[in-house]
Amino acid sequence: DLTPDRTTESLFEELVMNNVIKSYPQVRLKQFIGNISYRGAEMKASGVEPNPGPGDIRRLITEYCILPLGSEHLRENTAPIKSVLLAGPEGCGKSMLLNAICTELGATLFDLTATNIVGKYPGKSGLNMLLHLVSKVGRLLQPSVVFIDQAEKTFIKKVSKTDKSDPKRLRKDLPKLVKNIAPEDQMILIGNSRAPWECDQKGLTQAYQKMIYLPKPDYSYRYSLWKELIISAGGNISHSDFDLSSLTKISDGWTSGSICKCVSEALTEKRVLQQKFKHLQSLEFIPALAKYEPVYREEEEAFIQWYTKTPTGKKRSKILEGDDEEKGKEKGKK
């Protein structure tokens, strides 16, 4: 123990002062709205691996992160999940899910993102102290979530000359931190990544046991999202002037984050009041939507190619192949 004579309060205060322990907005997992991927069976039948829907992602977050840390019985009777990587385009809900995990657990949040710890606890001895403090305080104030944004940068092959954050600082120590999380500990590492293919995959898979891909929203998800957000903001879309279906089709490729911003910009307090005299129309959201970049096909394909090569993706493919084999056997028997 590097800090045997210090109180929990003093250690907590030090980490708060250094912005390592952070507060987070209260977000419930149910606020990550949307259903499971209903087209999963149809896509699988045509030989295409289906992307997970919001309902599937909520289930995985609950299964990997919330239930194990919240249930002593599960920790004692199941293999521990010590780390999870959330990967997806910007605006697809990674930060929201992190905040939801913390909120549901009432967790202490430790931010070890390279840009957040740059210049803090310098040198090898300083890094050892930082990791000691996170591990010690994390156990004293559990449940605890250790977070790393731009997780791929920890294992990036070549650091840009303009990047002064020393992103590879935790390269050797992060897998050790995860390994040292005992089954009885209510601790988990959560990483967020927008470009997980840009790093050494061996290091990434050593640090993160499970990987969840957050794709761009499909038609069903976008329809639910537009409807929920507009109504929540005071919009009336029950009249014939509002074409929700067309708005959903037009916004194909845009992320949930872009749609959220779009509704906030277009549906101002003044516009909500004006609905008494002028019906709200779907076209009013298009100028705001045009300000944001969609997820292009190249980026989407890069995510899919990366995910299918991960241990989680390979396991999922084997399960799907197994289902197909079983169906083939059944047809043969008939």
Image (spheres, rainbow, N blue to C red):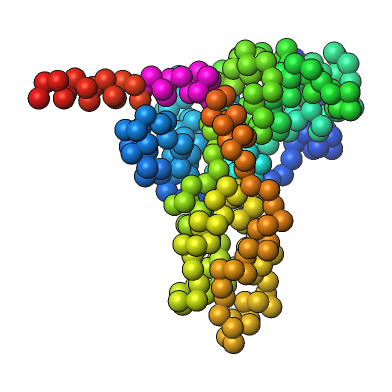
Q: Is the residue 77 above or below the residue 232 in the image?
A: above
Depth check: 188 or 334 in front?
334
Residue 254: in magenta span: no
Q: Position of residue 102 (x, y in %)?
A: 60, 41
Residue that protrudes farthest toward the left in the picture: 334
- At x 55% / y 43%, what residue is drawn? 216
Residue 281 in view: yes
Between 301 and 114, the one lying in front of the other is 301
Q: Position of residue 326 (x, y in %)?
A: 23, 22
Task: Please tell me in which quadrant of the rendered image residue 307 appears.
Answer: top right
Q: Residue at x 68, y 36 (%)?
A: 109
The quadrant the C terminus occupies is top left
Viewer-closest of 197 and 269: 197
Is any part of residue 120 visible from this angle? no
Does residue 73 appear left or right of residue 174 in this picture?
A: left
Residue 281 locus on image (x, y percent): 56, 73
The percent coordinates of residue 224 (x first, y second) are 47, 57
- Our reading of the magenta stretch's main secondary structure is helix
Q: Which residue is at a point 57% across and 47% down the rendered structure image?
A: 253
234 lies left or right of 5: left
Q: Quadrant of the N terminus?
A: top right
Magenta span of residues: 307-319
Q: Horizontal placement of 301 versus 169: left or right? A: left
The question of residue 314 being in magenta is answered with yes
